[in-house]
Amino acid sequence: MTDENTKSRVDTSTMWGGRFNVGPDAVMEAINASIGFDKRLYAQDIQGSKAHASMLAACDIISVEDEVKIQQGLDTILAEIEVGEFTFTTALEDIHMNVESRLAELIGDAAGRLHTARSRNDQVATDLRLWVRDAIDGLDAETQRLQAAMIDMAEQHAATIMPGFTHMQAAQPVTFGHHLLAYVEMLGRDRGRLADCRKRANESPLGAAALAGTSFNIDREMTSRSLGFDRPSANSMDAVSDRDFVLELLAAASISGIHLSRLAEEIVIWASAQFDFVRLSDGFSTGSSIMPQKRNPDAAELVRGKVGRIIGALNTLMVVMKGLPMTYGKDMQEDKEPVFDAVDTLGLCLAAMRGMMEGAVANEDSMRAAVDSGFITATDLADWLVRVLDLPFRSAHHVTGELVKLAEEKNIGLEELTISDMQSVEPAITADVFSVLGVENSVASRTSHGGTAPENVKAAAIAARKRFL
Ligand code: ARG
């Protein structure tokens, strides 16, 4: 519940208004307040405050009695928020002051000692790093679940032949399993980027105070350790002023989103009546209210569309940060909505993609029919001319082009040309050439490392399971 009174019900002077005579204008309050969205940081804020209070007592900066009251008060507040019994107040601006003000109501004067040797600047940076860390762990797990679904499907289709495309033109036959495992690799790198940014994000700003550090004899190692950070940040000004850890997450999320959007685009294509390569489950298709024949791939289209928001969030925060002088500026309060939205959106897209993959059925006949139309084994023919007749590849390419033209004129496939048709273009060709013109042969011959041969794909699926799951 948020207090919507335009006139401040709360006397903000208890927080920072000592030298002000009147409370903020209603519009000032509206532009200043972040509680509407940063309430989402409540658990991290309380966790950070509890660690700070323990440290203050351990360093004899506050009494143990006050610390106990603070800890109990913070636990009460956490419980109140979790059961929905906490009143969030706009006039108290943000999560930090909402919690602290409630703490004062609960425990009186001791509450005022919690903010010793701390500022909202290091507090918010700490909260957000804790949140980003959890967000990364959640996205990693969801990405891994998508990989698992795709590896299962790839294994099942290690020998299912489909056209591989370049320029959206059928290029060479591949297996559907090989195509799916390409995405498993991309998702693996997405997870690598998340892990990488987690390492740099995992430093504790707590104790940097407003920007300069503090004159109190605090123990930053202690709070860093108890919050699970790898170390306290080395420079107090850097600690409160940079949001590169959020930018890195948004960049990693954007790249991951781009991968999901490409897969979504392929699903849209594959699910069309013209391709008919996959049939999505009823649970992940929608009907048209007017055209009964349709099964629309709305979830895939929405993934493709929603990724725009993730990239937009990255752009938003880059623009917010680019002109900021050291150290903290209130502009940086604008970091939260984009990162919350981007993380929610990516999580939803990953889950939707997994749902689609788990229920999708590949239509092997349509894939096969698409392979058989066109001259998809032309490269195999050129390779045969090089390997068996020792033609330079460029001449082989030319001969093959002539043969494709001939087949096109006759309106038949390459494998349907007669040996004399072949020899009319290149007299040295023998009947052995037909052995490479079948798509099964073509696919089976691609045994080079990372190639599409079914035996490779089977092994690659097993290896992927070991590497990623
Ligand atoms: N709500 C603020 C934010 O999100 C907290 C830090 C405010 N610090 C300050 N000096 N006003 O950035």
Image (spheres, grey):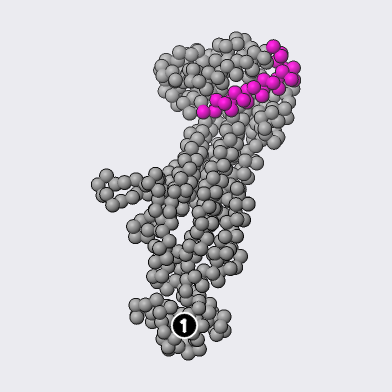
Q: Is the residue 167 above or below the residue 185 in the image?
A: below
Q: Position of residue 63 (x, y in %)?
A: 71, 13
Q: Main secondary structure of the magenta part?
A: helix
Residue 122 visible, this angle: yes
In the image, residue 49 lies in the stretch drawn in magenta: yes
Q: Position of residue 263 (x, y in %)?
A: 46, 53
| Quadrant of the snapshot with the N terminus | top left
Residue 319 visible, this angle: no
Q: Is mark 1 within 8 Å of ligand 1?
A: no
User: Which is more toward the observer, 42 or 115?
Assistant: 42
What residue is disc 1 on?
399
Structural crowding at the residue carrying mark 1, measured as other residues with C-alpha within 10 Å and reported as few (<14), some (14–19) or many (≥20): some
Residue 270 located left or right of residue 73: left
In the image, residue 161 lies in the stretch drawn in magenta: no
Q: Position of residue 361 (x, y in %)?
A: 43, 54
Q: Is the residue 211 above or below the residue 353 in the image?
A: above
Q: Position of residue 291 (x, y in %)?
A: 26, 49
Image: magenta residue range: 40-65
Residue 404 located left or right of residue 204: left
